[in-house]
Image (cartoon, coloured by chain):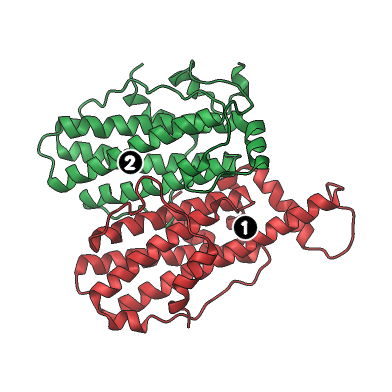
Chain colours: A red, B green
Amino acid sequence: MKNGSMEELASDPSSRKRFLKMMGGAGAASAFAVFLAACGDDDDEASPSGNAMADQKDRAAAGRDLQIVQYALTLEHLETDFYNAVIDSGVVKNMKLADTAKLIRDAEQAHVDTLTGVVKDLGGTPTRPKTTFDSVLEGGEMMVLETAAAVENLGAAAYLGQAGRIQSKELLAAALSIHSVEARHAAALNQVVGKSIVPDGAFAKPASMDEVLPQVKPFLA
Amino acid sequence: MSREKLAVPELAAIDVKGLTRQSFIARGALTAGAVYGLGTVGPFVRQAIAQEGGGDVEIVNFALTLEYLEAAFYQQALSRVSGLSADARELATTIRENEDVHVKALRATVEQLGGKPVKAPPVDFGSAFSSPQSFLKLAQTFEDTGVSAYNGAAPAIKSKEVLGAAGSIVQVEARHAAAIRALNGEQPAEGAFDPALGTQEVLEAVQPFIKA
């Protein structure tokens, strides 16, 4: 899928639904419909499947999916804010690196836009954390680059940590398409700061929410 | 074995003998820890894997085929490409080591799922090794295609453990891709979202390099 159309998807709800369907296939799309039907109604009507326990499980899983998307959105906001702060400060003097920062920022913004739409589609109110990077910027160019590398590696690990918890196949496909891009960013920045492109070796390690959130706490205002 | 039951019928073109239809785990505990770094899985998961082993076996064998291809590609490159820069040589060595580990792990996973791992296909990379540039160009294609192949196949994986392994591997392939792209003077990613490719598309892309 061309990158340009992703930006369109971010702003057009019906395109987004089509995107999510395309990513995951027909079976997953109907699971989505079941979820939307279940969540939109407080009445005790007969469920489509006639099985209260299955509906409860579906609802719980859909709730978890929403929580996961909000979590991803929080991390993407963090990344976008970070790169915007870096670009605005002009602390990265190297032209090529400054260009890379802009391209990564554009990608993270696209992630924010898409995930914001997904949260709304799932019936949630998109999170929007307040962020702060003053201490990082004050540390100078190398500190900024090392932080960028750390954040991208953490983001990749965070997505990997959620892959097995996502219920919706479309959402999983979308998460994977973002996960691998974060990994690319991580490797590129690791090279810039002299770290291994594969710090965990042949198998990347996942990080749980409990492991990730303390590491991003310093950047949440 | 009936072809229409195969989740990935195209695999038959690569190695018919390797696939089995066992639907139970012949061996003991699935040592997911060896592949994914988690603790031993519980009995429910083992049973779930046993019931659903068919589809996952085919998907893992598909991934294994790609890993064999890449492992052979880098191994051959290291001995055949002259004029490789130190950076390119170091990267190719790292990637080759990672792919060898992936091959071993995916073979073990197929066996743990009660299936038979496909064999390494005979390969021919044509004139790819005639220069560092042609090698790195094809390397970029392989790595990018590998990422899209895993992203395309992963949502169909039934076992959470196998999905975790696939995710763990695709992240490393994406890291490889970024590093190769850096050597090619390219940006690490083509856009904000990596595309997913279907099995058929991937097999068509790699078919030229697999000797009939």
- Is residue A77 at all visible to an observer of this figure? yes
- Are callouts 2 and 1 both on one chain? no
- Sort mark 1 into few (<14), some (14-19) or many (20+) by Cα contacts within 10 Å: few
Q: Residue at x 44, y 67 (%)?
A: A109
State the image coordinates of residue A209 (x, y, percent, origin top left).
54, 64
Above or below, B13 relative to A209: above
The residue that mark 1 highlights is A14
- In front of the other: A100 or A72: A72
What residue lies at 35% left-to-right and 54% top-to-bottom?
A184
Whole-number angstrom distance, CA of label 2 to CA of label 1? 41 Å
Query: Which image quarter holds the C terminus of chain B?
Result: top left
Query: Relative to B31, is A135 above or below?
Result: below
Q: Is B192 left, or right, of B133 in this rendering? A: right
- Report if residue B128 is visible in the image: no
x 33%, y 20%: residue: B122
Point out the frontmost of discs 2 and 1.
2
Which kind of residue does numbered mark 2 sit on? Asn
Question: Hey, which quadrant is residue A67 in on the image?
Answer: bottom right
The secondary structure type at the circle numbered 1 is helix
Query: Is residue A77 found left or right of A166 in the rendered image?
Result: left
